[in-house]
């Protein structure tokens, strides 16, 4: 834990400008076991601004959205949560999450819901099921070594079950 904290301190810039020894720019913090990035410098931390491209893309992309997939979020942080009500009324909104979220933003689940669908579960499991239904498991298998261990293990288990 201490080594990880040191890595974060040495690789991630201080957006609040409280640590004079913090780097000017962030670089990925790599996992000491697998070498993959564990903290990505492009992550927007709570309290910091989203990149200007986010706001540009909202005005350009959102009017044309047919399907909005919302995954693994509480939908309480603005302005990212505004995406759910910036899509056209005709757009389908799919929420993939452990718990239903977004009621206060106008998302309605259940049999009478016109355009909202709740896919309950762990994101990896729900998306893997979708990938299987779309017939893309073999395509994903080719990328398994590039997935996080948990995701890769889940995929391998699914593929082993499929072979039986």
Image (cartoon, grey):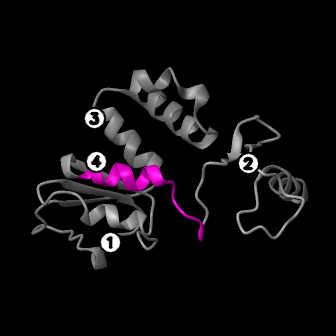
**How far is mark 4 from mark 1, CA to CA?**
23 Å
Q: Residue at x 32, y 72 (%)?
A: 102
Give the magenta range: 46-62
Circle 3 packing at 10 Å, graded few (<14), some (14-19), many (20+), is few
Task: Verify CB contact (< 8 Å) between mark 3 and mark 4.
Answer: no
Q: Nearer the viewer, mark 4 or mark 1?
A: 4
- Give the x, y percent position of residue 122: 45, 55
Between 81 and 16, the residue placed more toward the observer is: 16
Which label lies toward us, 3 or 1?
Answer: 1
User: Circle 3 is placed at which residue position?
Assistant: 133
**Marks 1 and 2, the one that precedes in the sequence:** 2
Query: Which residue is denoted by mark 2 in the rendering?
Result: 26
Of callouts 3 and 1, which one flags the residue occurring earlier in the amino acid sequence? 1
Q: Secondary structure under badge 2?
A: loop
Residue at position x 39%, y 56% in the image: 55
Q: Residue at x 59, y 43 (%)?
A: 150
Question: In percent of the image, x 59 and y 68: which residue is there?
Answer: 46
Q: Are marks 2 and 3 in contact (CB under 8 Å)?
A: no
Is the Cβ of the residue at disc 4 closer than 8 Å to that at disc 1? no
Q: Compute the Cα span from label 2 to label 3.
A: 39 Å
Does the rendering let one see residue 164? no
Q: Which of pointers 2 and 4 indicates the residue nearer the eye?
A: 4
Quadrant of residue 139 in the image? top left
**Mark 4 — residue?**
60
């Amino acid at each position: 834990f201490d080594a990880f904290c040191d890595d974060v301190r040495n690789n991630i810039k201080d957006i609040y400008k409280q640590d004079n020894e913090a780097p000017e720019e962030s670089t990925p913090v790599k996992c000491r076991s697998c070498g993959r990035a564990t903290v990505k410098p492009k992550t927007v931390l709570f309290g910091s601004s989203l990149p200007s491209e986010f706001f540009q893309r909202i005005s350009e992309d959102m009017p044309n959205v047919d399907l909005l997939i919302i995954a693994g979020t509480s939908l309480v942080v603005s302005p990212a949560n505004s995406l759910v009500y910036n899509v056209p009324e005709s757009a389908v909104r799919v929420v993939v999450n452990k718990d239903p979220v977004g009621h206060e933003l106008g998302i309605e689940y259940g049999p009478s819901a016109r355009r909202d669908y709740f896919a309950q579960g762990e994101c990896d499991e729900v998306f893997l099921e979708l990938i299987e239904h779309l017939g893309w498991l073999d395509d994903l298998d080719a990328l398994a070594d590039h997935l996080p261990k948990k995701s890769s293990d889940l995929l391998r288990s699914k593929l082993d079950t499929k072979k039986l």
